[in-house]
Amino acid sequence: MKRIVVGLSGASGAIYGIRFLELLRALPDVETHLVVSDAAKRTIVEETDWAVKDVEALATRRYDNKDIGAAIASGSFKTDGMVIVPCSVKTAASVAHCLADNLLTRAADVTLKEGRPLLLVVRETPLHLGHLRVLTALAEMGAVILPPMPAFYNRPKQIEDLVDHTLARVLDRLGLPQHLVTEWPGTNRRSDPPQRG
């Protein structure tokens, strides 16, 4: 059984976190531990037709963001990584500066200090120098910065295709199975004409 901590922060893109929880729930050997910030709860209501309680019900276990004594706040609670999806710049900055002033940022700090995978699906644009410095610091600390950049080589037909493409990359980085995106086979280029002479 793999344990994955999932954090939803208040950045736009709540659908990424919701869909990620759906995908993890479909994996029989994955246990999810969820923490949702207050700002994320508001974003879920503003951006989707989901109720917060229904999003929380997708997880194996859920925690209050103020519960700094929760299991995921301790390095002795073994996990296989954490994903903050979506991740606001505020949350990223809190993790980069080791503030750990709520459960979401404490769990991320624990993930880094224990040398476990921490993936941040940072949803902000454009990025100013302060943002870039925060993201650089996180990368230097060992976090994976994985913003939801749309890809078009797979010819997406709807928004869900774009969401799934990003989340397939997240699952790949965690070593979890996914069938959302096939492995790139390479381009079908014509052979160059033979050289004369």
Image (tube, rainbow, N blue to C red):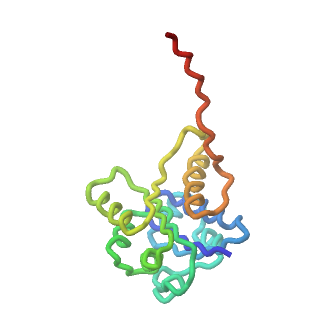
Residue located 61% across and 43% down the image? 184
**In the image, residue 174 above or below residue 65:** above
Residue found 68% across the figure and 75% down from its top = 1
Residue 138 shown left or right of residue 4 in the figure: left
Name the residue: 55% across, 81% down: 63
Asked whether residue 41 appears in the rendered view, the answer is no
**Whole-percent x, y for residue 47 in the image:** 52, 57
Q: Position of residue 20 (x, y in %)?
A: 60, 62
In the rendered view, tell whether residue 193 sits above or below residue 167: above
Residue located farthest toward the bottom when viewing the structure as drawn: 69
Q: Is residue 143 visible?
A: yes
Q: Which residue lies furthest to the front in this view?
A: 197
* Residue 91: image location, x then y, percent: 39, 69
Which corner quadrant of the image does residue 129 belong to? Answer: bottom left
Residue 67 picture location, percent across and down: 48, 86
Task: Count numbered badges in the picture.
Answer: 0
190 left or right of 132? Answer: right
- Going by the picture, which residue comes out furthest to the top? 197
**Residue sticking out furthest to the left:** 129
Which residue is at 59% across, 23% downward? 191
